[in-house]
């Protein structure tokens, strides 16, 4: 990790700190529950509105239309063109997050 300190004592690194936000991602064919990563203090919406076409998801569990688990992945990227809706789990109704 490269670390640079400017003349005012401010630290800069090439590592971007992010926090995992447990989320539900609905595509046309599957529902994914996993951690979407956002910068500390950043709104979830701001992270989704950035110009990248893909979002990284860790600890992902993929469910089919019947709610059956069909796959797990430690890391995956999702093309935002295929996302119907996305929401943090803590904003979901009190269900099993599927």
Image (tube, rainbow, N blue to C red):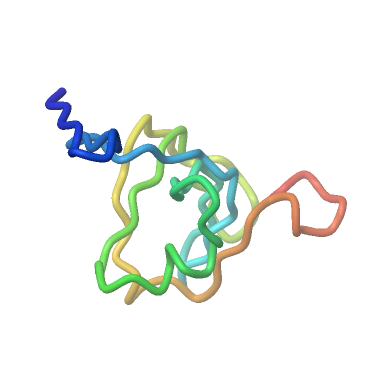
Q: Horizontal and vertical percent for residue 55?
A: 34, 57
Instruction: Name the outermost residue toward the top.
Output: 1
With 5 as the anchor, is 81 left or right in this view?
A: right
Which image quarter: residue 93?
A: bottom right
Q: Horizontal and vertical percent for residue 50?
A: 33, 70
Name the residue rendered at 21%, 34% in the picture.
13
Name the residue rendered at 46%, 33% in the picture.
59
Q: Horizontal and vertical percent for residue 16?
A: 30, 40
Quadrant (top left/top right/bottom left/bottom right) for the N terminus? top left
With 44 as the anchor, is 55 left or right in this view?
A: left
In this orientation, which residue lies closer to the viewer: 11 or 77? 11
Instruction: Name the outermost residue toward the front.
Output: 7
Query: Compared with residue 53, is residue 62 higher up or lower down, i.e. above or below?
Result: above
Instruction: Name the outermost residue toward the right.
Output: 94
Marks counted in the figure total 0
Query: Compared with residue 14, is residue 93 higher up or lower down, i.e. above or below?
Result: below
Q: Horizontal and vertical percent for residue 64?
A: 53, 54
In this orientation, which residue lies closer to the viewer: 68 or 21? 21
With 56 as the anchor, is 87 left or right in this view?
A: right
With 92 as the anchor, is 23 left or right in this view?
A: left
In this orientation, which residue lies closer to the viewer: 41 or 26? 41
Name the residue rendered at 59%, 43% in the picture.
22
Which image quarter: residue 44?
A: bottom right
Name the residue rendered at 29%, 51% in the picture.
77
Query: Compared with residue 21, is residue 5 higher up or lower down, i.e. above or below?
Result: above
């Amino acid at each position: 990790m490269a670390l640079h300190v400017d003349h005012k004592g401010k630290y800069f690194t090439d590592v971007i700190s992010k926090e995992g936000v447990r989320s539900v991602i609905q595509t046309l064919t599957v529902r994914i529950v996993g951690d979407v990563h956002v910068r500390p203090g950043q709104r979830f919406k701001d992270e989704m509105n950035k110009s990248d076409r893909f979002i990284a998801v860790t600890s992902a569990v993929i469910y089919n239309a019947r709610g059956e688990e069909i796959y797990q992945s430690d890391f995956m990227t999702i093309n935002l063109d295929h996302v119907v809706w996305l929401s943090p789990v803590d904003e979901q109704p009190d269900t099993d997050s599927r």
